[in-house]
Amino acid sequence: MASNSIDDQASSDTETSGRWVAILILFLVVVGLPLLVMNGASWLDVKPTISPPRPAPNWVMPELIKATTSDGTIVTAKVAIDVADSASRTMFAREGGQLVFMLQVVLAARSEEELTSKDGLEQLSKDLRRQVNGYLKAQDLPPVKSVVVQDLFLIKS
């Protein structure tokens, strides 16, 4: 009889330890697995592949440009210039009158028909940019990125 009680006790201990192992495995699956998933990305140190941001535009907006075109139309234009650096920005602030004069010359060389044509504003922007970049090159400054015509008013005479 004593032998039976030892066998019963041994099988009871085996069942108890088996239950504890099952409970431990269940606990690790229920609690540990979600924790591993939530913190896994930080362990892997995964970084998103985002391209570096482009530098923000550095716009210069000279005073209104007023000119009379080759066919007698009075033109008022508002432009914005995306300069390359602070040195160019400072130069435009210092020599704003010269900039306006250069832009007036480009406007005056146009006719009303050229300005109001399908590609008129685009061509005007390109010509304004070319003129400004020529001036900047003479000053040993980098070229402007773009010249945008924001407003263009025509008054027929």
Image (cartoon, rainbow, N blue to C red):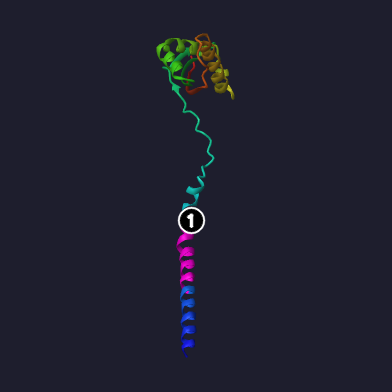
Identify residue for label 1.
36
Furthest toward the front, the residue is 2
Residue 26 is a magenta residue: yes
Residue at 48%, 28% in the rendered image? 55
Q: Would residue 58 be seen by someone viewing this image from the given angle?
A: yes
Residue 96 position, x and y percent, is 42, 13
- The image quadrant that residue 130 belongs to is top right
Is residue 69 visible in the rendered structure shown here?
no
What residue do we see at 43% from left, 13% from top? Answer: 91
Is 120 in the magenta?
no
Q: Position of residue 132 (x, y in %)?
A: 51, 14
Q: Is residue 55 positioned above or below 33 on the image?
A: above
The number of discs equals 1
Q: Main secondary structure of the magenta part?
A: helix
Give the residue at x 49% y 60%. 33
- Nearest the viewer among 129 and 110 is 129
Pointer 1 local density, CA inside 10 Å: few below 14, some 14–19, many at least 20: few
Q: Residue at x 49, y 11 (%)?
A: 102
Residue segment shown in magenta? 19-36
Estimate the x, y position of residue 22 in percent, counting from the top left.
49, 71
Nearest the eye: 149 or 25: 25
SS at badge 1: helix
- Looking at the rendered structure, the kind of residue marked 1 is Leu
Camera-side residue of 46 and 75:
46
Q: Position of residue 23 (x, y in %)?
A: 46, 70
